[in-house]
Image: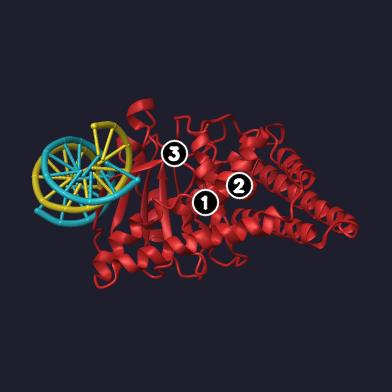
Chain colours: A red, B yellow, C cyan
DNA sequence: TAAATTTGACCTCG
DNA sequence: CGAGGTCAAATTTA
């Protein structure tokens, strides 16, 4: 499964990212120059989106350029970083899972929102196990796709809180979603059911005195986040703005310019990353990807599209785009 | 009552 | 043999 990507492919990817970044800048300038005639709130919203887009490009470029180095929030790779690194570099996975695409995402729990993107990535997961990991402070939760039996979807993920930084959640994804649950992704950012799962277990274990309280606090924080995000964007954005952004995304991540992108059933893994990014302007440590993730992304030139970045090409209709940025949707505000 | 979670037992692999 | 991963019965939740 572990394939090397050529320098040409890497350069091409970098060029595409650079181009996309430049386009985003141009869009930013265009929006800013035209915003004088529109409402100030609209321009601030646009700026917010553009900032996030540019930030995403910056991170992607940084990760590519430092391909040989793990990227970590605080410069001190977590235990999971090391395990994952070893896993890819030195220890081939078992035959069972050798063919399964695998990548890791690290998601920082937004301090202000309590939102854990890792636990709400738009897919429906069912927990099937939990294990105490040797040397780890926090147990590892094992999740599989809810539609495993119905649709034979073999996607799984492991969720574990970082030892060194308990605000960091590491999500280890395995396998692609072959199920069709795009509509479920309407629940992105708003599912409060899954949020406490990991926390509950961990707080029961580590803070037996106040587990329930912590859960409620975090749920409330999510609700606040949802409400604030909706307030900000609901009142500020216009349809045209959305369409502009949407068109830009389509251009920037067009399959025509990304030869290794192929249609896939996976569509919202990307937004494992997004909730915190959109919930906080803090770009430090909100989302972390390991080298192995990039390796995984780039090592699957034709078929693996689970990678967060690559799934951009799947937003081929407005509905999906609204799913990604659901701040304007009724579902978003009502849940 | 169906679906989801919990958790101890069991399996696999290094 | 031990650690990690999965199974499945019991329990909880909606």
Please name whichever residue, A115 or A210, is drawn nearer the observer in this view of the structure: A210
Residue with the mark numbered 1: A189
Q: Are marks 1 and 2 in contact (CB under 8 Å)?
A: yes
User: Does residue A101 appear anywhere in the picture?
Assistant: yes
Residue placed under numbered mark 2 in the picture: A326
- Give the residue drawn at x 52%, y 34%: A182
**Is A1 in front, or is A125?**
A125
A289 over A123 or under it: above or below: below
Circle nearer the viewer, 2 or 3 = 2
Q: Earlier in the sequence, mark 3 or mark 1?
A: 3
x, y percent for residue A139? 28, 59
Query: Left or right: where does residue C10 sit relative to residue A86?
Result: left
- Residue linked to disc 3: A101
Q: Secondary structure at mark 2?
A: helix
The answer for how far apart the CA atoms under marks 3 and 1 are is 25 Å
Task: Estimate the x, y position of residue A191 in percent, counting from the top left.
Answer: 46, 49
Task: Let me know if marks 2 and 3 both belong to one chain.
Answer: yes
Q: Earlier in the sequence, mark 2 or mark 3?
A: 3
Cβ atoms at labels 2 and 3 below 8 Å apart: no
C-alpha gap between disc 1 and disc 2: 8 Å
- The residue located at (52%, 35%) in the rendering is A183
Alpha-carbon distance for marks 2 and 3?
A: 28 Å
Residue at (61%, 53%) from the top-left corner? A64
The residue carrying pointer 1 sits among few (fewer than 14), some (14 to 19) or many (20 or more) residues within 10 Å by Cα, namely: many
Q: Earlier in the sequence, mark 1 or mark 2?
A: 1
The image quadrant that residue C5 belongs to is top left
Where disc 1 sits, the SS reads loop
Which image quarter is the N terminus of chain A in?
A: top left
């Amino acid at each position: 499964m572990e394939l090397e990507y050529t320098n040409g492919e890497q350069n091409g990817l970098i060029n595409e990212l650079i181009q996309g970044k430049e386009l985003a800048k141009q869009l930013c300038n265009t929006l800013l120059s035209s915003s004088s005639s529109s409402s100030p709130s609209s321009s601030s919203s646009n700026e917010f989106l553009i900032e996030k887009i540019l930030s995403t490009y910056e991170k992607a470029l940084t990760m590519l350029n430092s391909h040989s180095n793990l990227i970590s929030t605080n410069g001190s790779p977590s235990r999971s970083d090391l395990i994952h690194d070893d896993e890819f570099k030195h220890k081939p996975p078992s035959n069972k899972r050798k063919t399964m695409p695998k990548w890791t995402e690290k998601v920082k729990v937004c301090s202000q929102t309590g939102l854990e993107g890792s636990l709400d990535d738009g897919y429906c997961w069912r927990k099937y196990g939990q294990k105490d990991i040797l040397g780890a402070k926090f147990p590892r939760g094992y999740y599989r796709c809810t539609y495993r039996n119905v649709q034979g979807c073999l996607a799984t993920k492991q969720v574990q809180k970082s030892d060194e930084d308990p605000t960091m959640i590491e999500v280890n994804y395995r396998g692609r979603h072959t199920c069709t649950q795009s509509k479920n992704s309407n629940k992105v950012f708003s599912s409060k059911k899954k949020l406490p799962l990991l926390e509950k277990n961990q707080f029961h274990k580590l803070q037996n005195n106040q587990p329930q309280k912590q859960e409620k606090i975090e749920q409330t924080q999510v609700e606040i986040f949802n409400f604030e995000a909706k307030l900000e964007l609901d009142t500020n954005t216009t349809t045209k703005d959305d369409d502009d952004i949407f068109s830009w995304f389509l251009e920037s991540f067009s399959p025509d310019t990304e030869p290794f992108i192929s249609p896939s059933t996976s569509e919202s893994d990307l937004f494992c990353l997004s909730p915190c990014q959109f919930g906080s302007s803090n770009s430090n440590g909100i989302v972390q990807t390991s080298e192995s993730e990039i390796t995984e992304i780039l090592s699957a030139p034709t078929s693996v599209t689970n990678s967060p970045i690559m799934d951009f090409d799947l937003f081929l209709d407005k509905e999906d785009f609204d799913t990604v940025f659901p701040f304007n949707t009724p579902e978003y505000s009502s849940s």
